Image (cartoon, helix red, strand yellow):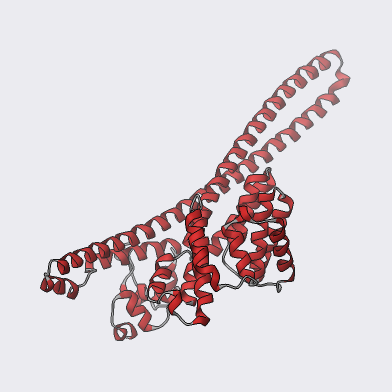
Amino acid sequence: MYKAYIYTLRSDFINANQILSSLPAIEKIEPELRYLYARIQFEKLLHVNILAENQDSVLNNRIWEKYSKYITSNDVYYSIYYTSLFPQKVTDSIYTILQTEAAHAPEATLQKAFLQYCLSHLSELKGDMNQAFIYAICSAITDIQLVNNDSQSMLYIIQLMNRYIEGEEQLERLYNYTQFCSENIYNYKDLGRSMQLIEVQNQVQKMYKQFISQKRERNSIIFAISIILFVAAGCTVYISYRRNKKKIKSIQDVTSDYKEQQTHIADMQKEIDVANDKVKTLEAEIERKNNFFIESLRTQVNLVTKFTQSKKTILNLITTSQLREAKKLLSDSLLNNNELNQLYESFDEIFLSIHPDFVERFNKLLTPEAQITLESPQKLTIELRIYALVCLGVTDSISIAKLLNYSPQTIYN
């Protein structure tokens, strides 16, 4: 149950549904587990709504009618789920109840963070943006106190800032917040949140480019005006010098002002260069993450497609009473060596893109004659692949053997 709950929070619905499919219906499980089972269904629905452009009101009503009876109405999560699924139906009295529950909820708890997030969303719907920001920030602070890598509160702050706040300072803060969310999402392995973050990062990048373009235009105008003023000042000084040599001091003053202007222009050019570097860094980071998620998704889709086709073939054989052929197909491996190699090569490429210095760091642990050289820059050896998994936190031989399709004794050796 708890594994399914964690997978749901990460938007990993494939693993969550696989676990839930192995369990009986909610009416047939132990009564003490029905509360958690219902909460998993609501959490899954909330994450689906976050990823979807429009909520499915029919689905929301169906899930609510089926599972809300397993959560008592005085339970705080009853109010939270109702508010999240039907925000337009929330009355002022329910809003006041949520405020009271949030005020009395224990500090640094998921319950308090969730209540504050709901209140922020409701405040935005009511048009009270000041209160919406306050509740969203409090929810994010609670997540940080909990070391909770679910970045929904921080993502909501970014979305609010993107919609309602303008200015140079906002862009810098938005960039920092997106970096913070990116680290949390990577550690939490939350595919759903990553898609949201990529969308927000693209918007921030467009705003940043517009700001840089406007700043360049202003600097160009300032530079042109400076040139005009300098020419005018030079003409004035020349005429004054011709009329009276005693006014040479005025020329020196104008020259000094010009040097200061040149220094100011040079400083502005440095700011533009720094801003351009940040834009390039952000573009490279977005491209790397886009490639990472696309490759991961492509590999998973290919495997799911193969298993689906094999399943249909076996079903057709059984339906047509070709049991011998179905048995033979089942006895064969559904995943051949080429596909396994493709899967491992995809893992190698993604791992080395995240840890490009892994081989170099590993070789520092070995004597010169035992150094490992890769046959291909993007392909790990078997030994390095084992230690890549160890680097990711998989440290027992049995788990590594299952992931790499070897016997535990081979891995142990």
Q: Residue at x 46, y 73 (%)?
A: 4
Frontmost residue, 361 versus 281: 281
Whether residue 97 sits left or right of residue 281 in the image: it is: right
Residue 50 horizontal/vertical position (percent): 52, 56
- Can residue 388 be spotted in the picture? no
Q: Please identify the quarter of the rendering in which residue 118 is found.
A: bottom right
Residue 108 horizontal/vertical position (percent): 68, 72
Residue 13 horizontal/vertical position (percent): 43, 65
Whether residue 178 sits left or right of residue 301 in the image: it is: right
> Which quadrant does the C terminus fall into?
bottom left
Q: Residue at x 74, y 66 (%)?
A: 100
Frontmost residue, 268 versus 338: 338
- Can residue 287 be spotted in the picture? yes
Whether residue 329 sits left or right of residue 356 in the image: it is: left
Residue 274 horizontal/vertical position (percent): 61, 46
Q: Residue at x 16, y 69 (%)?
A: 318
